[in-house]
């Protein structure tokens, strides 16, 4: 805490002590007010302006410092100044005082809360920004809630001062009027309890519901406004229509069928989407072949004879397609029809928020209606506007799987997860790979020490990693494909045979007719979704790559639950998507798995943390498999074992990460992991050893020294006596 805060605390304490020491608390009582009413009224009659000003200053001080006596001061306003002037003086002074208390609480405490509980504060601020005014008005309208607590609590949120002051002023007016009016009849008031009778409190409680009712009415009007001009069908063909048969669409349809809703799934191309056909499945199959090649090439690590790898790239790609075919039945129309889903091969276009025009792949069209519609059309590779790129017939994650000849010289544009995975796979399969990254490190979302381990392995496997290279132009020179890059003010020439573009993905919304509904995609092609996954209309939802912000298969499945459940039951109860614990894995070698905060993110958000590291070169299983490299890094709050984030860099990182993900999801700390039996020798023992490193760093040294003395005393020996050491001959 800085000096200014300490100074403010000292000033507040001094004023409070002076208040009590002077006996001011005895003045701000009902008996004192009634006893001295006449004499005070006589003085006020001769000094009205001064009296009102002094009264307001005292009222402001009492409210700002949360001192007792605000209720008596309000009665005094009515007794001495009447309804009109009393109400004006009290309402203005109480609002100023409440605002000062609000600011003091914010100045003294909020920064500390933001440091310690950044995620909680951020979530609270989002809620306050959205609905805070309604809830503040509710609290202000019910005098049962102590106003000084409201002042302090709201000061800890991100509510704007102007909003707080205006809502407080309006919300306190009814209660202020009741007290001021009672003050005009001070002789009949025996206690403040006479003012707030049970009936009056009930009236205030009902009045306090008004903001919540108003919120509902505003929402109702907003919904009516967004649907204005659309005619809602009287009956529907389906409960849910899902556009897109990728991970998000499949899960949405599955959930709807599981709860016996009538659901149709519309897919123009292949079921399974990117994950099955062009993403997760084929890329991991290719990576496995590349790892096998690397094992053969370096068999001497395992006491065997290394052999030159001579593989047929066509055979490798044939294996990839066989694996796709083997997984395909899991996502097939036949399987989903058995589950109760109507699978339609065709293209869907919006006609209204409840109606789609479906052009079947055989050419005929029909219109289908549903109470709710889910957009799950996925994404597609983004192609940057680099001059000459289109003339290079660029490869990307969609069309890569159709090639049969392996590029001898492969240029990979992009250093993110997709680019890094494929660059490493092709390098291990024998291509000469140059990887161009505009930024200063690979895997830009990870910490520098994580990216460094990956880059060292890439370079050891022959990848030419070019960081801080900005692609500026593609050309063909003497029949050779060439990329020119800008690097530290110089123009760099890179020749290649084929280029693989992996600089990100964009949402796939072409042909959906979203413009008819007034839905405009964002710059990256995704559609803007609310926390309940709805898109502009309460019955239209989006999930998966087309919704963002995460473009993972497991994120798409996670979002699909919210889209489907809110689409089917949103009129009764809606759920906001929860991204608190979102893991991901980059399947390079070494693998990189992360969940929660990284060091860089924690620093950027001002979150205090400690770092615990465990080197996988110490793990027996890793040593036995000659994969003893990499590390585990866990972030925790200072002195606490709560996991803020974890990253695993090494073999089997994705599997090791699962334990940290589970712990974070269910608020289990490192002590729980340490106290769990892990079989030996396994890779997951590393999670326990990482927890042990944290425990060792937080061992109670003072207690251990006392225990050392206790054990020495129980042995009856001097603890400082040196022990004899056994030394074999």
Image (cartoon, rainbow, N blue to C red):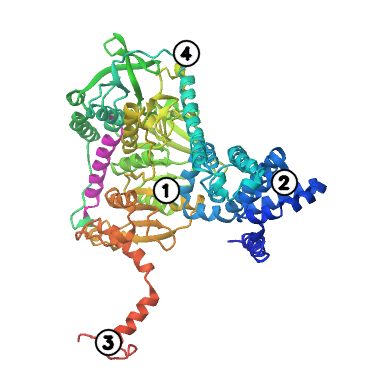
Q: Earlier in the sequence, mark 1 or mark 4?
A: 4
Disc 1 crowd rating (10 Å Cα; few below 14, some 14-19, many 20+) is many
The CA distance from mark 3 to mark 2 is 79 Å
Say which element carries label 2. Answer: helix
Q: Earlier in the sequence, mark 4 or mark 3?
A: 4
Say which of 136 and 2 sits in front.
136
- Residue 150 vs 363, above or below: the answer is below
Based on the displayed image, in which of its 4 quarters is residue 184 positioned? Answer: top right
- Residue 573 vs 164, above or below: the answer is above
The CA distance from mark 3 to mark 1 is 52 Å
Residue at 35 percent of width and 68 percent of height:
696
The residue tagged 2 is 80
The CA distance from mark 1 to mark 4 is 48 Å
The residue tagged 4 is 229
Q: Tell me the magenta residue range.
A: 277-299
The CA distance from mark 2 to mark 4 is 58 Å
Q: Nearer the viewer, mark 3 or mark 1?
A: 3
The residue tagged 3 is 714
Q: Residue furthest top?
A: 364
């Amino acid at each position: 805490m800085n000096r200014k805060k300490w100074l403010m605390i000292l000033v507040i304490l001094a004023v409070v002590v002076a208040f009590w020491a002077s006996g001011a608390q005895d003045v701000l009582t009902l008996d004192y007010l009634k006893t001295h009413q006449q004499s005070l009224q006589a003085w006020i009659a001769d000094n009205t302006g001064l009296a009102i000003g002094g009264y307001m200053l005292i009222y402001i001080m009492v409210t700002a410092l949360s001192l007792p006596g605000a209720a008596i001061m309000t009665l005094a306003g009515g007794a001495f100044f009447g309804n009109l002037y009393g109400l004006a003086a009290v309402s203005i002074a109480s609002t100023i005082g409440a605002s000062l208390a609000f600011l003091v609480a914010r100045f003294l405490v909020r920064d500390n809360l933001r440091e310690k509980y950044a995620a909680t504060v951020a979530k609270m601020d989002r809620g306050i920004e959205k609905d805070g005014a309604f809830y503040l008005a509710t609290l202000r309208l019910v005098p049962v809630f102590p106003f000084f607590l409201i002042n302090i609590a709201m000061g800890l949120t991100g509510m704007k001062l102007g909003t707080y002051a205006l809502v407080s002023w309006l919300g306190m007016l009814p209660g202020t009027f009741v007290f001021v009016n009672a003050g005009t009849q001070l002789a009949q008031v025996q206690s403040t309890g006479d003012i707030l009778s049970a009936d009056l409190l009930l009236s205030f409680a009902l009045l306090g519901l008004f903001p919540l009712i108003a919120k509902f009415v505003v929402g109702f009007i907003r919904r009516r406004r967004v649907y204005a001009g659309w005619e809602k069908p009287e009956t529907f063909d389906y409960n849910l229509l899902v556009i897109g048969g990728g991970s998000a669409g499949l899960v949405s349809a599955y959930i709807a069928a599981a709860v016996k809703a009538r659901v149709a799934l519309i897919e123009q191309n292949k079921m399974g989407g990117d994950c099955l056909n062009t993403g997760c499945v084929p890329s991991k199959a290719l990576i496995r072949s590349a790892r096998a090649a690397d094992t053969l090439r370096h068999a001497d690590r395992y006491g065997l004879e290394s052999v030159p790898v001579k593989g047929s790239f066509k055979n490798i790609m044939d294996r990839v397609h066989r694996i796709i075919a083997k997984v395909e039945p899991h996502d097939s129309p036949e399987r989903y029809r058995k589950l109760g889903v109507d699978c339609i091969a065709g293209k869907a276009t919006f006609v209204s928020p409840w109606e789609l025009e479906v052009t079947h792949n055989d050419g005929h069209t029909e219109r289908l209606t549903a109470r709710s519609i889910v957009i799950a059309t996925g994404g597609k590779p983004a192609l940057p506007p680099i001059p000459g790129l289109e003339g290079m017939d660029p490869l990307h994650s969609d069309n890569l799987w159709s090639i049969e000849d392996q590029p001898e010289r492969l240029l990979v544009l992009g250093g993110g997860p997709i680019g890094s995975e494929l660059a490493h796979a092709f390098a291990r399969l024998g291509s000469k790979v140059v990887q161009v990254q505009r930024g200063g490190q690979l895997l830009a979302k990870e910490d520098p020490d994580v990216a460094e381990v990956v880059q060292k392995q890439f370079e050891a496997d022959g990848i030419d990693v070019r960081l801080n290279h900005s692609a500026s132009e593609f050309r063909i020179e003497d029949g050779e494909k060439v990329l020119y890059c800008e690097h530290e003010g110089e123009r760099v020439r890179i020749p290649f045979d084929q280029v693989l573009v992996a600089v990100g993905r964009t949402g796939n919304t072409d042909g959906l007719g979203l413009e008819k509904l007034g839905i405009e995609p964002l710059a990256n092609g995704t559609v803007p979704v609310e926390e309940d996954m709805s898109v502009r209309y309460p019955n239209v939802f989006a999930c998966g790559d087309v919704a963002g912000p995460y473009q993972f298969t497991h994120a798409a499945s996670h979002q699909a639950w919210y889209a489907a459940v809110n689409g089917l039951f949103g009129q009764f109860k809606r759920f906001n998507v929860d991204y608190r614990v979102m893991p991901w894995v980059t399947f390079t070698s070494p693998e990189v798995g992360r969940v929660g905060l990284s060091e860089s993110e924690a620093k950027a958000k001002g979150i205090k943390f400690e770092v615990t590291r465990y080197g996988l070169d110490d793990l027996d299983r890793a040593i036995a498999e000659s994969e003893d490299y990499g590390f585990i890094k866990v972030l925790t709050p200072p002195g606490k074992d709560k996991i803020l984030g974890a990253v695993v860099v090494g073999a089997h990182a994705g599997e090791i990460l699962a334990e940290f993900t589970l712990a974070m999801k269910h608020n289990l700390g490192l002590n729980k992991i340490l106290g769990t039996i892990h079989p030996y020798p396994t890779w997951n023992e590393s999670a326990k050893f990482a927890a042990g490193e944290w425990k060792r760093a937080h061992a109670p040294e003072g207690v251990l020294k006392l225990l050392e003395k206790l054990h020495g005393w129980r042995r009856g020996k001097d603890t400082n006596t040196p022990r004899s050491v056994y030394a074999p001959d």
